[in-house]
Image: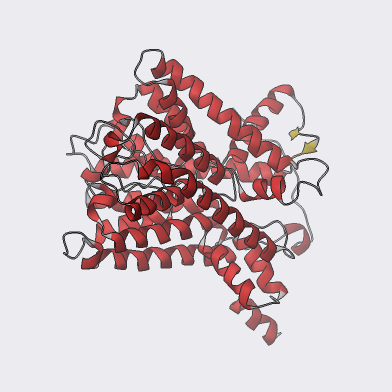
Amino acid sequence: MKSERKTKTKQISPYLLVILSFIGVILLGSFLLTLPFAHKNGNWGNYMDALFHATSATCVTGLSTYSLGIGGELTFFGQIVMLIMIQIGGLGFITILTFFVSLIQKKIQFKDRYMLAQAVNSTSIADVTKFVRRVIVIVATAEILGFALGLPVFLNVPGYSVPKAIWASVFTSISAFNNAGFDIFGGTSLIQGMGTIVDTMPRWAYYYMQGYIMILIVMGGLSFLTIIELTFQRKKAKQLSSFTRITLLMTGSLIVFGFGILMLTDGISGNITPYQALFQSVTTRTAGFASFDQSTLSPAGKTVSCVLMFIGGSPISTAGGIKTTTIFVLILCFVRFLQGRKISAFKREFTNSSIIKTMTLVFLSVVVLLVGYICIASFERGNDAATTNAVLYETFSAFGTVGLSESLTTTLSLGSKIVICLLMFFGRLGPITLFQIFQTNIDNEKNTHYREIPTDVIIG
């Protein structure tokens, strides 16, 4: 009995392990970003701003309180620190740890495999190390491809040396694939007419850069499970799994939906071009790069962008948001309820557990957004830039780990910065991950000798 108790007390929840790993990376990164040689002016950095950027990078968001952006504020050392945090945040610290552990140790015990499988969202306990290694291969391949595609762009920027062009291409590739949205161009992302290097690019290079960035964003937000099934397991599987079908269907549908609605709200009036509408539809799926000033969007266009930011990418990817599978199940529940049919798709019936988890996630996310908005609106009462639309946009952007802003981020007060940090943290890990550590995981049917009498409650 004593030995059993000891083992139980020593076990750490994998969800808690993930949370602690993210917190550890953020705290270490914030310390490094305060050092004088991390800033171009050679002074010690403001810790709150350092903490904000460490959180934004680790949670792959892209929001920045520096008016000149990280390219104008941080030295090469500071930019490297940011890039490492982006990479860790996109993959997850546990994923990287599992990879190195699997290289050092040939055999990992079952209990450790089980914990790691839950921490990295692997569907197989036995193949958790294989899963992680494949993820690393996918990430490395995608980022090298992104670097190769981007190098011709930066080699054509006037005044850029070869080493500077290489670094710009590396940074952009990793930031885009990990859906981080950070750039080192001068704090205005990809918006032209703001006096940054984007203005000096040849026309072909500017649009070509947006094209390959969109490809990297979609790849990063597609789900590693889907990519693995489409590449490593393509010959073994006779047909695609339901999960892969849903992620592919929803990813394509949301891009088309976002593009179409944005063209109706802002494209027809000439407020944005078709290419900008397409880029906006892709980047709002948690990437954060901007090709135009977000404050120029119509109220309807901002609403559409907020919806896309709220949904985000797919599970087990570098993206944030409530995820494509969640919105699929939610819509499916609504449609099947109206039809009076079971909740099923692709010849598969969804479990009550999936449905309850979907409803819980959406409810918790709405609550977090509502509380975040109320707090920021209260803190920014005297801020002229903090209009209702701007605060809402900032709140959705932080929770969806997107990074788009109506230029509000640089004007935020201390209280609002803390709230934004919490929103980014909640959004990256997901509300359910944070609440899982408090669950007892007790199966009532196995641990009780009775069952409650089922009943219907009047709804609506």
Residue extending farthest bottom: 2
Question: To which quarter of the image does residue 265 belong?
Answer: top left
Q: Position of residue 138 (x, y in %)?
A: 60, 53
Colour scheme in use = secondary structure
Front-most of residues 171 and 385: 171
Front-most of residues 20 and 4: 20
Question: To which quarter of the image does residue 222 belong?
Answer: top right
Q: Is residue 218 visible?
A: yes
Q: Is residue 430 above or below residue 189?
A: below
Question: To which quarter of the image does residue 79 belong?
Answer: bottom left
In this image, 42 relative to 161: left or right? left
Q: Position of residue 368 (x, y in %)?
A: 43, 45
Q: Position of residue 366 (x, y in %)?
A: 47, 40
Residue located at (35% from left, 35% from top) = 392
Which quarter of the figure is the C terminus placed in?
top right
Q: Is residue 301 above or below residue 21?
A: above
Residue located at (55% from left, 52% from top) = 432
Q: Is residue 284 visible?
A: no
Q: Position of residue 329 (x, y in %)?
A: 65, 36
Which quarter of the figure is the N terminus placed in?
bottom right
